[in-house]
Structures are given as structure tokens and as C-alpha cells.
Image: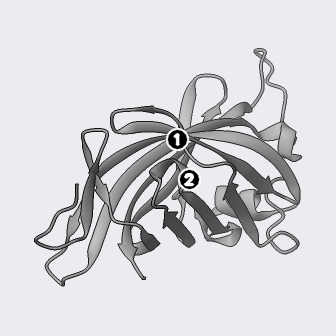
Amino acid sequence: MSDTATNNTRVWNGVTIPAPGTYELDPAHKLVGFVARHMMVAKVRGHFDEAAATITVAEDPTESSVSATIKTASITTGVADRDAHLRSPDFLKTEEFPTIEFQSLGGVTKVNGTEFVLPGELTIRGVTRKVELKVEFEGAGRNPYGMDIFGFSASTEIDREEFGLTWNVNLETGGVLVGKKVRIELEGEAVRQA
């Protein structure tokens, strides 16, 4: 059942997963990104430089939980004027709402091998909506520094207008400048704390 050599992993449903415990997102090995449509014809990608997450891996893996905080002012798309606009009251209103929060609800569902769904609540600009993260477990082990780690990727899609992010411009050719749908993409490595 367990990896007796290191006791840092165990086998569950045929998959090697981390031992129970509390894990923190490694700041050096993470990506909190997003993709939005621009002018109906292209995609703009960006990410948040500052984010933290605590992952509690339960004895029963389906009862595991996640809480995460993203610093809104750390948004970057590689274009300074656009980043300033995204921080403004038209979008994230970062001075009033310095963080985006996620809290999982009810554990893991719909497990299929290394893929599962993590339901939770996402709060942006003080508005909380239920979302489902589609998660892929990427593996568990021990790094060269003797720390127990595991990797994951996750994604979801939100309607930004449901969170009060309604700013837009109508285009002469039809459509709008910024699409309503935003895809959130996460990649990370978590390190055992206790």
C-alpha cells in the first residue's frame, strides 16, 4: 500500500499518490495563467506572478482540500498599458480587491485515473461563484533536497461578467473587444509541510 522506502507516497486506485499531509504551492514551480479572446479573432494570455495555495491531502484522497490566494496586482500580460487597465476599476479593481480567492468544497469528485474534478468557490472582486477545476495529477516523489512533492495541472472556464468584470467596447465590425469567457490554467508543484 505504501512506499516503505520513503513513506512519502502510497498507491490508491492503481495510482501512486502523496502521503496524507499539508502541502504548499512551491513559488518557484507554479503558473497561474489565463486566456481571453481579443477582438473576436485572437487570444491574449497572461498570468499572476504572486499566488499561494495550501493543499491538504487527506487519508481518504477524495476528502482532500485546497485553498488558494492570488494577488491581483501581480497580473501581467507583457504589455504595461494593458496590465494597468486590468488592474483598474474597469477590471480587477486591485486597490479595493487585492486578492482572488479559491476554496474547494466537498472534496474530489469524478475520479478517472489521474484526472479528477475539484468543486469550489472562486471569489473575484468580492463576488463568489461556484466553479469546477478539472485537475490532472502529474506524479509524486521526493526532490533532491529530501522534500516530498507532487505535481498537478488544472483548468476551468469562467464568465467574467458573472464576477462584475463587465467592461467592454463594441467593434464596428460586430462583436466586442474582450470576450466574456476566460480560461484559467494552473500548473504547479506542491511541497510537504507537515
Q: What residue type is labelled 1?
A: Ser
> In this orientation, does residue 106 appear?
yes
39 versus 183 height, above or below:
above
Instruction: Give me the residue at 54% from left, 34% from top.
Output: 43
Give the x, y percent position of residue 159.
Answer: 76, 34
Q: Separation of disc 1 and disc 2 at Cα?
A: 20 Å
> In this orientation, does residue 79 appear?
no
- What label sits on residue 187 in the rendered view? none
Q: The N terminus appears in which quarter of the rendering?
A: bottom left
Instruction: Give me the residue at 68% from left, 71% from top.
Output: 73
**Which one is in front in this view, the residue at disc 1 or the one at disc 2?**
2
- What label sits on residue 63 in the rendered view? 2
**28, 130: nearer the viewer:** 130
Q: From the viewer's perspective, tell me whether residue 123 is left or right of residue 110.
A: right
**Badge 1 is on which residue?**
155
Identify the secondary structure beneath mark 2: helix
Q: What residue type is labelled 2?
A: Glu
